[in-house]
Image (spheres, helix red, strand yellow):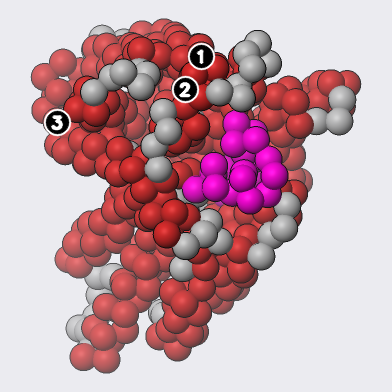
Amino acid sequence: MNQAILWHRPPPCPPTVDHRKTLNITLWLVAIGLFMQTLDTTIVNTALPAMAASLGESPLRMQSVVISYALTMAVLIPASGWLADRFGTRKVYFSAIVLFTLGSVLCAVSQDLSQLVASRVVQGAGGAMLMPVGRLVILRSFPQERLLPALSFVAIPAMVGPMIGPVLGGWLSEQFSWHWVFLINIPVGVAGAIATRTFMIDKRETQRAAFDGVGYGLLAFGMAAISLSLDGFSGRATGHATVVLMLVFGLISIVTYWLRAGRQAAPLFSPALFRIHTFTIGLLGNLFARLGSSGMPFLLPLLLQVSLGYSPTHSGLMMLPVAAAGMLSKRLATSLITRYGYRHVLVVNTVLVGLTIASFSLVDASHPVWAQVVLMAFFGAVNSLQFTAMNTLTLKDLGQRGASSGNSILSMMQMLAISLSVTVAGGILSAFSHFVDHGAPQDALAAFHATFICIGLLTAASAWIFWQLSPDVPRESKKDDSLDLG
């Protein structure tokens, strides 16, 4: 039995008025929690130059603020389902909001970059539990006829948060200070914690499997060590020997986990899932394709502010076409996949994403704003189509027994990819910046251009992974419930 979020349907019973009210309040609490969590994945990006100026750091070396948040979420997501089963969804969700709010307070009062990074770890620890535990509450509390509308309702703030994050972050840092990027979470967090303690439905699994603590420790250490070692190569580490050792031990830890998992009766994630071809290809594609594209929300606001002289608010507004086009292009995914199949759509679209990223190397101060908006919108459209196709490919053939565990692996991999992507993008940008005197905006622009070309080529190269799909991969799901998952 896997250790991820367990699917459990409540027995049907006629809802009372009070029960319906509790369900509605719970739904809003989950929606607000998801909004807070997704908002903070993008709100800091447009505020990074202001943070750098205030903390006496180079804006081209602020990737640690993003990496620490995403990496913490990746590390803690696998444990969230077990924690909810062990302590109950209400306690865990309440603790998640408190941690997230406390982390926001600590971020706002940070006096240097090290304090800010440590505070983002606390914030990420809360954010890691908000999304999976919130979804678990809905899955276990809502009757079948209300389940799809409920999940659709909480998906809206998850889309809106990243969309308004850059604009809000830029406006707050320009009109007030960067501290307000975190301070706005406090009243929402306090109200949410009180409401959760009072109203949220409490669900827990009475028959739960033992948590694979050793396996979790190996996996968590491996992810953290690899990500931090790659960040160390960008110049923040004390020495390259330490960085190399971290990378080696991280890889050994990951390999040890998978060798051990094959011999465990109840591993954290069963290796049997990787016998599903579409799951394996989708997961690898998610990781390597996102290594390039997931660094763009970090790079683009820096490009606009540091090299093109945009204000924080203006740079945030320039990110709106990315999100808006992305929301619209999601509607095309189903029809394109049905007509052309996963292999053709993902191979062609991955190359398009890579070429679009590389084309940002042509952007400079002489480009008209409308051309920049068109490029932003096109990137948002193909990038969103990429994510939708990759995610559906990854999950489409998992049976009911594998869906929960597979979804948790995918969520973990997505956050890990964000961390690694920003690490790689920041490292490449720092490396190229050593070749130019970036005291002037036009000098830094050359480093940005070279970085866009490199990560664009990296993204396009990941199309090879999707080429390994059979052309006959069915458009519809072919779920496999026969796997022995332990």
Q: Which mark is residue 332?
A: 3
Label 3 packing within 10 angstroms: few (<14), some (14-19), many (20+): few
Identified by mark 1, the residue type is: Ala
Q: Which mark is residue 446?
A: 1
What residue sits 58% from the left and 73% below the top? 98
Reply yes or no: does residue 51 show up in magenta.
yes
Image spot of residue 53 (x, y percent): 61, 45
**Residue 293 placement, left or right of 352:** right
Image spot of residue 448 (x, y percent): 50, 19
Identified by mark 2, the residue type is: Gly
**Tag 2–tag 1 contact (CB < 8 Å):** no
Magenta stretch: dominant secondary structure: helix
Q: Which mark is residue 29?
A: none
Q: Quadrant of residue 210?
A: bottom right
Upstream in sequence: badge 3 or badge 2? 2
Element marked by disc 3:
helix
Q: Which mark is residue 292?
A: 2
**Residue 322 placement, left or right of 180:** left
Please tell me whether residue 222 is drawn above or below residue 346 in the rendered image.
below
Q: Which residues are magenta?
A: 47-73
Q: Nearer the viewer, residue 175 or 255?
A: 175
Label 1 packing within 10 angstroms: few (<14), some (14-19), many (20+): some
Please tell me whether residue 137 is drawn above or below residue 214 in the rendered image.
below
Task: Point out the frontmost of discs 3 and 2.
Answer: 2
Please tell me whether residue 76 is drawn above or below residue 328 in the rendered image.
below
